[in-house]
Amino acid sequence: MSISCTSVGPCGLYCGSCPIYLARFYPKLKAQMAEELHCKEEEVVCNGCRELTEKCWGRHCKIRLCAENQDVQYCRACPQAPCDRVKRLSMGYWDMPEQQLQELEQMGEGEFLKLMQQRWTCTCGHPISAQSFRCVACKKEIGITVTC
């Protein structure tokens, strides 16, 4: 099941690799995320960082709200970049947000989204979660390499 995603958060994370975004397509992942987030399954909802609704998990994301307040699309364009929030987030995701922001800046959005779709799709055709670096379907662990 190929997930077509055209959204990248202000932090640099590709929404198509976000377990909260992917949970809407995979019921087992939704249950797992609800357990990890200590909430009900129906609360694990996200349409992607650029298409948030009142029910979406990321509506209160401090990084997204900060980017909105700074009037920047991506955190790298902020005069305070890289801030502590993005640095902390990057540590939790093996430096992917900061590295992907750099790639986005170098490649442009169109090419970057093509790369993200390729990078975050398992050989079985299902998405890879950036949280675990595992395919959400076959559970194969994936070695992600980033070159900037």
Image: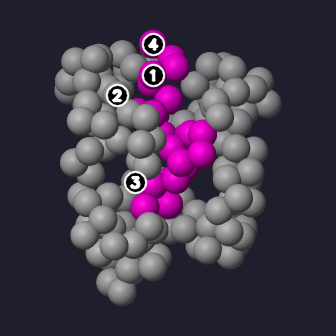
**Separation of disc 3 and disc 2 at Cα?**
21 Å
Q: Which residue is mark 1?
A: 24
Q: Which residue is mark 2?
A: 45
> From which residue to which does the magenta span run?
5-27
The quarter of the picture where residue 147 lies is bottom right
Task: State the SS at label 1.
Answer: loop
Q: In the rendering, which numbered label is found on residue 115?
A: none
Horizontal side, residue 117 vs residue 96: left or right: right
Q: Earlier in the sequence, mark 3 or mark 1?
A: 1
**Separation of disc 4 and disc 3 at Cα?**
24 Å
Q: Which residue is mark 4?
A: 27
Mark 2–mark 1 CB contact (< 8 Å)? yes
Q: Residues within 10 Å of mark 3 (few under 14, many from 20)?
A: few
Residue 35, given in percent of the width and then of the height, sits at 28, 22
Horizontal side, residue 2 vs residue 66: left or right: right
Residue 114, given in percent of the width and then of the height, sits at 74, 51
The quarter of the picture where residue 5 lies is top right
Q: Residues within 10 Å of mark 4 (few under 14, many from 20)?
A: few
**Separation of disc 2 and disc 1 at Cα?**
7 Å
Mark 1–mark 4 CB contact (< 8 Å)? no
